[in-house]
Image: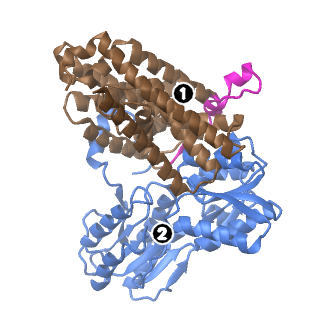
Chain colours: A blue, B brown
Amino acid sequence: MRGKPMRWFGGLAGVVLVAAACGGTPASTASSSPSASPSSSPSAAAKLFIPMISKGFQHQFWQAVRQGAEKAAAQYNVTITFEGPENESQVDKQIEMLQAAINKKPNALCFAALDSKAAIPLLQKLKDANIPVIGFDSGVDSDIPVTTAATDNIAAAAAAADKMATLIGGSGDVAIVAHDQTSRTGIDRVKGFTDQVKNKYPNIKIVATQYGGGDQLKSTDITKAILQANPNLKGVFGANEGSAIGVLNGVKESNKVGKVVVIGYDSGQQQMDAIRAGTEAGAITQDPIGIGFKSVEAAWKVLNKQSVPKNIDTGFHWYDKTNIDAPDIAALLYK
Amino acid sequence: MRIGSIELTPARRTTLMRSDAVQRLLAFAALIVIVVIFSLLSPNFLQFDNVVGILLATAVNGILALGVTFVIISGSIDLSIGTVMTLSSVMTAVFITEWHMPVPVGILAGVATGALAGLVNGTLVAKLKIPSFIATLGMLNVAKGLALVVSGLKPIYFNDTPEFNRAAMGSVVGGVIPGLDIPNLVLVLFGCALVAGLILTTTVLGRFTFAMGSNEEAARLSGVNVDAWKMAVFALAGVFSGIAGVLIGARLNSAQPSLGQGYELDAIAAAVIGGTSLSGGEGSILGTVIGAFIISTLTNGLRILSVPQEWQTVVTGGIVIIAVYLDIVRRRQQQ
């Protein structure tokens, strides 16, 4: 589905009907796999079938997770599908996707819960059917998942707070522009950053925490309003990629480049360019490819009766101008 | 029910205008009240930079609202304007960065993409008789899907054509009057509003837009080619979506394929707050522009005061309800 040839779809009218036919649910199948779903018994003849229900689909972060998952699928010779709702508030859509995946009688299932409690009845069903569940990206409040491959977002955001404290000299006003106040990652990152500042840096004050849904334009306007209301602001933390891009944009439009320390999260071309140019001090990167790879790998291991730890910490790293091109960091960044 | 041909007589239209004027006056008064309140509550509100911020934040929504005002007055609805904007933005990026069209040509082609999508909407509604709510809901998804397909799920950056961003964010006004750095993007908003106002009040298209919305059957019986004019109205909305797409691309210096949904509701809200009647036949461009400013001013002010996000949403929603209620009261008095 990806790649440049599709851009030749320039003639809009001609493809409207085609797209209308497939425009409903964004879903995709790993390129190596047949579309028919194999039966439930893991035999040597049939490939193992492991659907992945993600929290999102169209953001680059999820594309990187998918990339890692496909890599593992190829390596372990299993069939995966990767799908997720359009945005991180569509809990109901995700539950439907989970239900549909269960109906295909998978061998195992990887699941990144939008709302960890909402999915429990369905997960129980999987448990009753002896289908192992692997959590990825964020945990589920339940014992059902055999393991969870995820970033410790609280620790990662706390690390961002430490960097912020160093960069602004240990005192002053800072603000947070986050993506969502109800999703797990939104809650954890705001909490991680806020708690660290409260506990460790009494001279730093978080004067505003606002949410732009990860929408670059809204986050831009939010940042400008925060800067307007707090002329002495020393730093802003953008808690996901879209938020960080909005923060960068808002700082630029307010002519505060160089006066306000910007710290971001995840990567993407725009943040990487800004970090290289020095307009963004640095960012926390997770290991999205690792998250995808390790969750499929864990599923394979479980199905082959190998032991897996209860939590797989996929790690996070601070990167800035000095190490953005270092091989171990560059491998984690997506454009 | 009103009887058809009467709608077209000058006297009747004057009354309509006059009742519109009441709502416009109310909306304008509300805007002033909002500005005064925020100015009293925060010294940072009524400052040049922040006013520019509000103007910028109004531009995209305001231009989308101009288009949808025509559609609503004509008695239909267009839910696709937000994602058609996104598609136009992505296509503009493809035209400029992939096909290497000169920037002005790429902009025109991007706007044409919007117009084409609008024309498809118009055809679905006028020729295939699909209710506009459903037809444009379909287009919402088609445009959203196409934007993702064409972009390969990734933002496309205008890094090789910095003049694109400069054209929108630079300031012609600032060049003439030093210090008055109002970005050109804001001038585009006012230019579009002026053109839209002239079309609505002085052209045949405008007159028939009102006529169709007041009583479609009567308009048809009086010899108006309703199908053709309806298509024109939707195409016009598409043009404005296209312009909004170009502007959002220029402001973010990138085409972001995953935003856009939800923008249609803000635009419809702006039109309704400004006195455009959802039952058709009534509305004005001035009202819509004021409505758009009410939304962006309110959002900006609440952000500056650091009102919690959830309450910001509640307040904005409440304003829409009050506006519609006032509209209903006014209509009742008229009868």
Q: Which residues are magenta?
A: B154-183
Task: Give the residue type at disc 2.
Answer: Gly
Q: Residue at x 28, y 39 (%)?
A: B133
Q: Is residue B98 visible?
A: no
Dividing the picture into quadrants, the one containing residue B69 is top left
Q: In the rendering, at what x and y percent does residue A99 appear?
A: 28, 69
Q: Nearer the viewer, residue B269 or A18?
A: B269
Q: In the rendering, at what x and y percent does residue B241 appear?
A: 43, 32
Chain of the residue under label 1: B
Dividing the picture into quadrants, the one containing residue A167 is bottom right
Helix, strand or loop status at disc 1: helix
Within 10 Å of disc 1 (Cα), the crowding (few <14, some 14-19, many 20+) is many
Q: In the rendering, at what x and y percent does residue A143 appear?
A: 42, 85
Helix, strand or loop status at disc 2: helix
- Residue A292 tag number: 2
Between label 2 and label 1, give the one nearer the viewer.
Answer: 1
Q: Is residue A277 magenta?
A: no
Is residue A273 shown above or below B187? below
